[in-house]
Amino acid sequence: MWLTVESPVQRLRRPGANAQGGERVLITVGVHGNEQCGLVAVNQLAAEGFFEQLWAEDSKLSELTLMIGNPGAVKANARFVDVNLNRIFVDEAKVRSGGDSYEESLTPALAEAIDQSTWYLDLHSTSAPTPCFCIPASASSIAVSESLPVQYVLEELLCSLEGTTLHWASRDAGRVAVCVECGQHLEPESVDLAKSSIVQFLAEAAGKVNPDRAAKHVLSCRETQPVRAGFRYPEGQIPHAFQHVKHGELLALDDEGEIRCPFRNGTYLIMPTAHSIVGEEAWFWGLES
């Protein structure tokens, strides 16, 4: 193993005189500790010698940093230890100084690593089976998102969240920042997708643009359905990812009553959770862009 909870950061630099002034890439895995396909992918690529081949003469890359975002949660195979690391990048002073919880103690180093990067890729997976998709942090990241081996591009999803590492990355409008959801946790296909995403993202950062960009299904995701007390699916039937639902269709229940689709033309359900946590998202609403 190359990237581990005992050695959660690997930093590779271009050798020689051309080491300065190029693109600085950060790839994070394990920001949620039970989402480990990205970690497996990084270690497989390292074992295959991939990272030793990055420094071609015509490459624009100068530095690559690979980081486990939440080593303690990865060790516990849990989403987080104390609080959700991917929801606390809100207050700049607190992010830079850290805090009392385990995850808050991680934010200064992670924020600094993002600040030093010009390209940022964050790899995740989902609890329920789902097609692979990516989330661009800004308009400047959409073109790169369309080059990645995913089926869907979800625009504006950050509008329905706060405090993610992508929010922090998007403070610099010139930075390319993308999150890829690779599929269900540790499925072989999810690991393969994570590997392909890393390879293609680094190729784009190196200036080797892929002209053959397959068409993606683009959805606008500005709203989310929160998990409230008593949340449950009717008869335990979890909707499948990217399921299209009709206006008024019953989707779930909680202590406040029925949850039905409010959109006149219907919508898609993005990342419906299989393990609901009160205060987090049951799913995102995805509208045809």
Image (cartoon, helix red, strand yellow):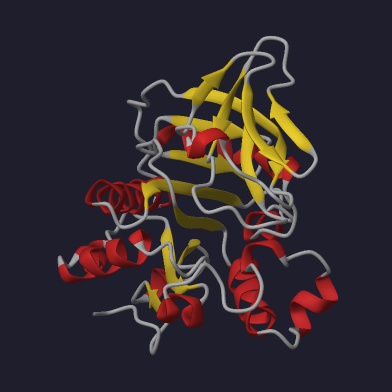
Q: Looking at the rendering, in which quadrant would you find the N terminus?
A: bottom left
Q: Position of residue 166 (x, y in %)?
A: 63, 55
Q: Position of residue 178 (x, y in %)?
A: 54, 48
Q: Is residue 9 visible?
A: no
Q: Residue furthest front?
A: 235
Q: Which residue is more in the foreground, 75 or 38?
A: 75
Left or right for 4, reference 138: left
Left or right for 175, reference 46: right
* Residue positioned 30% across, 57% down in the render: 186
* Residue positioned 52% across, 75% down in the render: 70
Q: Is residue 128 visible?
A: yes
Q: Position of residue 134 (x, y in %)?
A: 49, 41
Q: Which residue is more in the foreground, 275 or 223?
A: 275
Q: Give above or below for 224 relative to 206.
A: above
Q: Position of residue 105 (x, y in %)?
A: 66, 85
Q: Looking at the rendering, in which quadrant would you find the C terminus?
A: top right
Residue 85 figure quarter = bottom right
* Residue positioned 67% across, 9% down in the render: 265
Q: Residue furthest top?
A: 265
* Residue positioned 79% across, 64% down in the render: 90
Residue 160 figure quarter = top right
Left or right for 121, reference 182: right
Number of callouts: 0
Q: Give above or below for 258 relative to 279.
A: above
